Image (cartoon, grey):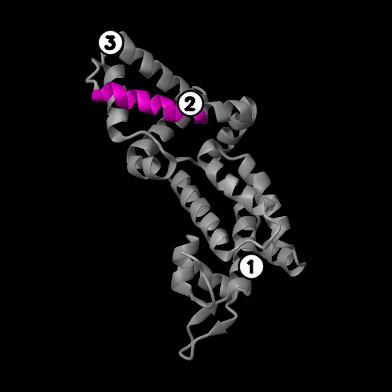
């Protein structure tokens, strides 16, 4: 949705991925206030308000407290500077945020001012993914994931990301061909599957368990938004693993 003109708080909340309560709070403390109101007193946000909201959301993602963010914005921190800070942060995140970082990269590369619809799209994606991860990974686990990303390097991360679509396609083909889960071919597929997952959790049992739980409870969303495996693919791999000799 392209945001133009004046936008009511409910629409802005839906488009940004923030809550109406959060937007009201930002208004109360003077962090992001609407430029105008309707005759009945409803908040109306314009493009400059949305750009300021983007700055707040990006700096908040970096872990800065609201009072510090307010001071930074009062010192006229530019949108380009905020985007640069967010770019550096996203580069350290796990692979599920790669597509968000790519969007920010494109916005930074554009010499013109970013459209408010682009800013809202990034906020929505980042907030949605952060909310999902926060349900399954605690702060200590997130720190270990960030450390693991640094250890294995961006080249290996890209290799794993590029390997998943091909592997998922081959597993889907095996399912369509009614491949026996006890066959050597099925076990080879499962070994490759588990190897890619191992690159994520590194043998850490708590990371592995949290990953599996997140996948099982959000399979459709992950498949739709990130091209992840279907429930049938995951069930096939589970069947192969269960059929292995003990």
Which of these two is toward me, 67 or 94? Answer: 94
Q: Are marks 3 and 1 in contact (CB under 8 Å)?
A: no
Which numbered disc covers residue 52?
1
3 vs 1, front mark: 3
When the figure is inspected, residue 100 is found, relative to residue 67, above or below; the finding is above
Q: Earlier in the sequence, mark 3 or mark 1?
A: 1
Residue 246 visible to an observer of this rendering: no
**In the figure, is residue 24 to the left or right of 109?**
left
Residue at position x 68%, y 51% in the image: 109
Which of these two is toward me, 4 or 63? Answer: 4
Quadrant in the picture for the C terminus: top left
Residue lying furthest right in this view? 75
Residue at position x 65%, y 51% in the image: 86
Q: Earlier in the sequence, mark 2 or mark 1?
A: 1
Q: Give the image location of residue 156, x and y in percent.
A: 59, 25
Which numbered disc covers residue 222?
none
Range of magenta residues:
161-176
How many dots with numbers?
3
| Residue 189: in magenta span | no
Image quarter of residue 59: bottom right
Image quarter of residue 175: top left
2 vs 1, front mark: 2
When the figure is inspected, residue 22 is found, relative to residue 41, above or below; the finding is above
Q: Give the image location of residue 207, x and y in percent.
A: 47, 31
Which numbered disc covers residue 163?
2
Q: Secondary structure at mark 3?
A: loop
Q: CA distance from mark 3 to mark 2?
A: 22 Å
Residue with the mark numbered 3 = 183
């Amino acid at each position: 949705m392209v945001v133009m003109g004046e936008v009511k708080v409910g629409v802005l909340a839906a488009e940004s991925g923030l809550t109406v309560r959060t937007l009201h709070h930002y208004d109360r403390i003077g962090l992001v206030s609407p430029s105008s109101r309707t005759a009945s007193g409803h908040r109306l946000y314009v493009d400059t308000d949305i750009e300021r909201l983007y700055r707040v959301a990006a700096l908040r993602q970096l872990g800065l407290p609201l009072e510090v963010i307010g001071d930074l914005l009062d010192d006229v921190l530019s949108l380009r500077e905020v985007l640069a800070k967010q770019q550096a942060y996203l580069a350290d995140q796990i692979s599920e945020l790669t597509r968000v970082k790519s969007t920010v990269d494109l916005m930074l590369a554009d010499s013109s001012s970013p459209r408010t619809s682009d800013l809202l799209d990034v906020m929505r994606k980042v907030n949605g993914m952060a909310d999902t991860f926060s349900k399954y990974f605690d702060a200590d686990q997130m720190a270990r994931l960030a450390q693991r990303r640094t250890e294995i390097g961006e080249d290996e991360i890209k290799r794993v990301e590029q390997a998943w679509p091909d592997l998922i396609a081959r597993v889907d083909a095996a399912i369509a061909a009614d491949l026996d889960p006890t066959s050597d071919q099925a076990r080879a597929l499962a070994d490759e599957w588990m190897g890619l997952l191992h690159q994520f959790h590194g043998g850490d049992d708590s990371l592995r368990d949290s990953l599996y739980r997140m996948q099982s409870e959000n399979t459709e969303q992950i498949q739709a938004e990130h091209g992840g495996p279907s429930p049938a693919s995951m069930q096939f791999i589970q069947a192969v693993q269960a059929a292995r000799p003990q």
